Image: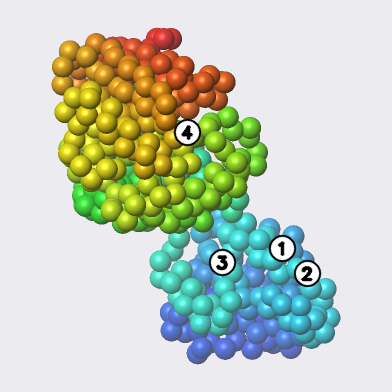
């Protein structure tokens, strides 16, 4: 179809004739290769009054127009424009805008040329982005973005979001709210399918958190993706995935591909993990956000795999003068595989261990910190704890869960104190998360005002009871979790 045959062209030309204005210029050849004859470039001369909103409204209503790319010097009626942007969004027609005025001199120049009041560029840009308008800075970006959006029509409905991190679920909600992107509520069919696939304690709401159970039942990714993608209210799918390794991520992507391709909806998979580390600046910002808003009584630290991240956490502890710090130096998996690189271990020993009130390595982790053999009995455990004190630790709790014998014995060593903590070893496969639970429970005790020894004793009892009660849970196959809520149900 030629430009002159489009509804938008006819509406605008008719309006110009009614207003007694000279016909404006369509530079059709410039954009013919982009929009394949479906639209053109409208050149609205200076002094054409309210024609800008009329032009845009006509293009939005034109059935043959799929994208509107605008180079505007001034948006005179922002509320009208934002209403048009909302209408375009509902129709699935993206708007791309290039707008001068980022600097003060540019704003003055635009104002002197158009006679319009020119506001703050950052405010304008924030309003446009919140209305889902794509803001670009160069003509090349304007053309390239328009071409991409003309060829690949964005979905009208909002995204379905699936993650294995409760924190990322929260960040996703905040981000969508900030940019004005509605997260659709899933229908009854999707809700039923998700309830059947997810563990009983997980919520089937969008965004969907598949929880840490996905580490044991990796089919959760596929089942939840199939349910969300099948929902008619979902226009696209985003999967922010926390993965320990590139191999894990690629295995999951490979398994998801048939489901994604069958659904035919745009899907983005974003991976965070050892090969995809979270930027240290982001972690520093998280620390500052929490400490500036909450009265933090204690801090528990788990696996930190990158030297720069360890440095950022140490700086944050200093910045907020936090001393009740329990460090669980997660470095070695149950399989014996190293989870962090040697550089990260050196940084951990140098900058973070001296800042912790207590470190809680298991037998393989204590050996890794000292670069020695794994302790074979209580005497060697105590000797290794003393060596860690000499190396800069303030107090050490070496956990004996990986050991043998009728008792599970932990040893706590301070500069001048020693405590032996023993419980009956429980024969169960449900030991997933015992170390994380223990260190978190110790931190909770410190936050309640307990001294370190009392906090360790209470945490040891709590975790032992949680392991013993774990058989009451029926969560998937393999190594199950401990029962954190055993005292209530």
How far, Cα to Cα, is label 1 from label 4? 46 Å
Q: Is residue 354 visible?
A: yes
Residue 176 disc label: none
Front disc: 2 or 4? 4
Residue at 17 percent of width and 13 percent of height: 406
**Mark number displayed over residue 357:** 4
Q: Quadrant of residue 69?
A: bottom right
Image x and y of residue 39, in percent = 52, 77
Q: Residues within 10 Å of mark 4 (few under 14, many from 20)?
A: many
> Is residue 199 positioned above or below 225 on the image?
above
User: Which image quarter is the C terminus in?
Assistant: top left
| Disc 3 element | strand
Where residue 349 appears, as percent x and y from the top left, is: 37, 47
Mark 3 sits on what residue? 134
* Residue topped by disc 2: 119
Of 107 and 277, nearer the camera is: 277
- Mark 3 vs mark 4, CA separation in Å: 49 Å
In this image, 454 relative to 380: left or right? right
Query: How far, Cα to Cα, is label 2 from label 4?
Result: 52 Å
Element type at marker 4?
loop
How far apart, in angstroms, are the residues tagged by discs 3 and 1?
15 Å
Of residues 159 and 34, the one drawn nearer to the viewer in this rendering? 159
What residue do we see at 29% from left, 49% from top? 340
Q: Earlier in the sequence, mark 1 or mark 4?
A: 1
Tell me the crowding category of disc 2: few under 14, some 14 to 19, or many 20 or more residues within 10 angstroms, Cα based.
Answer: some
Q: Position of residue 353 (x, y in %)?
A: 42, 42
Q: Which residue is mark 1?
A: 123
Which of the 4 quarters of the picture holds residue 275? bottom left
SS label for mark 2: loop
Q: What colouring method underlies this structural image?
A: rainbow
């Amino acid at each position: 179809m030629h430009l002159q045959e489009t509804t938008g062209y006819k509406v605008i030309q008719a309006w110009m004739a009614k207003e007694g204005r000279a016909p404006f210029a369509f530079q059709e050849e410039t954009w013919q290769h982009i929009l394949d004859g479906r639209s053109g470039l409208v050149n609205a001369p200076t002094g054409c009054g309210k024609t800008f909103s009329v032009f845009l409204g006509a293009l939005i209503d034109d059935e043959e127009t799929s994208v509107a790319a605008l180079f505007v010097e001034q948006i005179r009626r922002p509320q009208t424009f934002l209403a048009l942007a909302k209408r375009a969004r509902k129709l699935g027609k993206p708007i791309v805008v290039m707008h001068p005025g980022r600097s003060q001199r540019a704003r003055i120049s635009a104002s002197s040329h158009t006679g319009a009041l020119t506001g703050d560029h950052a405010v304008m840009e924030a309003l446009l982005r919140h209305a889902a308008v794509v803001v670009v800075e160069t003509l090349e970006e304007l053309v390239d973005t328009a071409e991409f959006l003309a060829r690949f029509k964005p979905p009208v409905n909002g995204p379905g979001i699936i993650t294995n991190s409760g924190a990322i679920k929260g960040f996703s909600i905040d981000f969508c709210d900030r940019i004005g992107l509605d997260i659709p509520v899933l229908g009854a069919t999707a809700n039923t399918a998700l309830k059947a696939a997810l563990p009983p304690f997980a919520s089937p709401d969008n965004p969907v958190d598949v929880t840490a159970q996905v580490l044991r039942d990796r089919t959760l990714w596929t089942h939840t993706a199939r349910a969300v993608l099948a929902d008619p209210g979902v226009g696209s799918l985003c999967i922010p995935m926390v993965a320990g390794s590139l191999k894990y991520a690629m295995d999951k992507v490979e398994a998801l591909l048939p489901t994604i391709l069958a659904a035919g909806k745009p899907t983005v998979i974003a991976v965070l993990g050892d090969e995809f580390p979270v930027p240290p600046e982001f972690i520093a910002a998280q620390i500052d956000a929490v400490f500036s808003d909450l009265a933090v009584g204690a801090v528990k630290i788990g696996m930190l795999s990158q030297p720069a991240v360890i440095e950022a956490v140490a700086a944050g502890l200093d910045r907020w003068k936090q001393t009740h710090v329990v460090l669980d130096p997660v470095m070695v998996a149950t399989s014996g595989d190293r989870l962090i690189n040697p550089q990260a271990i050196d940084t951990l020993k140098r900058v973070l261990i001296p800042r912790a009130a207590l470190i809680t390595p298991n037998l393989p982790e204590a050996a890794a910190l000292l670069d020695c053999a794994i302790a074979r009995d209580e005497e060697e455990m105590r000797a290794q704890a003393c060596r860690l004190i000499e190396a800069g630790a303030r107090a050490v709790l070496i956990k004996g869960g990986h050991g043998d014998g009728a008792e599970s014995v932990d040893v706590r060593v301070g500069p001048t104190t020693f405590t032996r903590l023993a419980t009956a070893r429980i024969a169960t496969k449900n030991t997933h998360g015992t170390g994380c639970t223990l260190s978190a429970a110790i931190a909770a005790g410190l936050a309640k005002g307990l001294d370190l020894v009392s906090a360790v004793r209470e945490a040891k009892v709590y975790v032992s009871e949680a392991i013993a009660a774990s058989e009451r849970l029926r969560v998937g196959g393999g190594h199950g979790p401990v029962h954190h809520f055993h005292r209530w149900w």
